[in-house]
Image (spheres, rainbow, N blue to C red):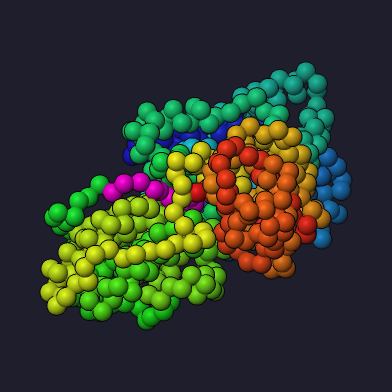
Amino acid sequence: MLLILLAYLGGVLTIVSPCILPVLPFVFSRTGEPFARSGLPLLVGMALSFTVVASLAAVGGGWAVAANQYGRWLALALMAVFALALLWPGLSERLARPLVAAGARLAQQAQTAGESPRPGSSLLLGVATGLLWAPCAGPILGLILAGAALQGASTNSTLMLLAYAAGAATSMAAALLLGGKVFAALKRSLGTGEWLRRGLGGAMLAAVAAIALGLDTGLLARLSLASTGGIEQQLVDRLAGRRDEAMAMRSEPSMMMQGGPAMASAPDTGQAMMAAGGAMRMTGPAAASTSSPPDEGRAPPLDGATQWLNSAPLTGDQLRGKVVLVDFWTYSCINCLRALPYVKAWDQKYRDQGLLVVGVHAPEFAFERDVGNVAKAMKNLGIAYSVAVDNQYAIWRAFRNQYWPAHYLIDALGRLRYHHFGEGNYGETERVIQQLLQEAGAARVAPGLAEVEARGVQQAADLDAVHSPETYIGYERSEHFASTPKTARDVAATYASPARPALNAWGLDGRWNVGPEHATLTGRSGRIVYRFQARDLHLVLGPGPDAKPVRFKVRIDGQPPGASRGMDVAEDGTGTVTEQRLYQLIRQSGEVVPRTFSIEFLDPGASAYAFTFG
């Protein structure tokens, strides 16, 4: 009940948020009409359509995002017809005829002098408005959508979205009732509503143009004097309990859909936590001891995987009597990649002694949901053990996991005996493996610890030298963006990167389209600049939707990297983006001090997702 109240209050605050401005003309087009027959059906339709679309997007993946985009364009066409009917009533019938029947009926019913509006037309207008409504991704909406994505389709998540929409409808209803009084006063003073009607039509056309051009998420946000983020975060802190609990809710996996939440990130040097459309990527010490691994309860089943790679689906009978290591990972996660050599070494060393390693691939970015990409990455990484593709986070939810990487050890009786989150403490984990194998009756357990020689991106990080956090390019989790102008969401814009960025500031240069999880170069060439301090710099990149290779050129302090090049870069700084994955661009050979990194793309279409450091 507390979360429902929190969602409702967050919706109420939407009225003073910049993202609501383009929607207001559609709401105020019903000003001056009977509220029960006009305004109320509009607000109900708006709340319901937003709730349905947001629920589908939170749990349905990319197809729901695409469907919502088509719906938005259909709604824009419908709104344009309605606005033109307000401006020129004589043209309404002619304008509506070539459009869909719903648009024709809406235009013919729109604000005709002397007629009372029908509830059906107001409801249809509200449904279309809901498709255009893209609330600012503040802390409260982030909580709701991240929870919906993690928990899957449920009545509770839909109720929270409905409460958020109801809160926004409440504040807009108050504005609508107040606007009705102003409208009536103006009609009395002017003697006619003709000019008011035309003014609303013009405002609606302007709003349609703003949404179509992306100004609703770019220019309007910069011009607005109101921001609800701070207020919402105070509500989260006060009503939802501890701040860290709220942040934990926001750091669980999501589908990274358009209009989705702004995910929290809390990176630091010693413990690099990555809140991703997924959870935290974490490095740090384990809390458990190998002296007596406690019984943490019956282990969850490995059911619900989208697909299995390297084996058929593993059943309970196949796991019985085995010591099972469950490794949650995703192939572009640098922390997962650095832990992988140890997981592979344990599989090779103890497989014949009763250890069964199961990788659970839970994706962060949309391209990691492609099973073909996962299979290719596994082949390149030399993974021979079974991997469950957990695209719907079924196994993730069963384990109540929140981290990448995460290691869980299950004994031969099916009891969960040990867990460790993040990199490190490999010796302790291996000693628990040995102890559980002995408990299971293994005739001989190989002594000592596995010797691992990791290279390239899998080499352990130099944490003492890392002073730069994991940094996301997409607007949902972007921080420290220093280009001019500020981020324009989901629309191509030309950016100028900072000449002298501060430490951990970054920027785009050229023409880019910044989406929720990545930025795509739309110009013929463009750059990304980052002022960082770390031994290694990695960047998750993709070649674009047509999969055409994209050439790039890396510079560090304006010079080719030379001996400080990463494994994906030549000494002269040249390289090519050929697939969607993490690229190691810098590995400094000398003293680690603040440096300015830049990557220039020489072909259009490159997509950039996130910086990581080591």
Q: Position of residue 473 (x, y in %)?
A: 61, 47
Q: Is residue 556 magenta?
A: no
Q: Is residue 172 visible?
A: no
**Residue located farthest toward the bottom when viewing the structure as drawn:** 312
| In the foreground, 95 or 226 | 226
Q: Is residue 553 visible?
A: yes
Q: Is residue 278 magenta?
A: yes
Relative to 165, does residue 32 appear above or below in the rendering?
Answer: above
Question: Residue at 22% across / 50% down in the picture?
Answer: 288
Q: Is residue 279 left or right of residue 427?
A: right
Q: Position of residue 291 (x, y in %)?
A: 14, 54
Question: Residue at 60% across / 37% down in the picture?
Answer: 594
| In the foreground, 538 or 3 | 538
Q: Position of residue 71 (x, y in %)?
A: 65, 56
Question: Residue at 81% across / 21% down in the picture?
Answer: 190
Question: Residue at 80% across / 23% down in the picture?
Answer: 191
Q: Position of residue 273 (x, y in %)?
A: 43, 45
Main secondary structure of the magenta stretch: loop
Quadrant in which residue 268 is drawn: top left
Relative to 593, does residue 581 appear above or below in the rendering?
Answer: below
| In the foreground, 247 or 418 | 418
Relative to 371, does residue 222 appear above or below in the rendering?
Answer: above
| Highlighted magenta segment, given as a residue range | 276-286
Is the N terminus in the top left, top right, bottom left or bottom right quadrant?
A: top left
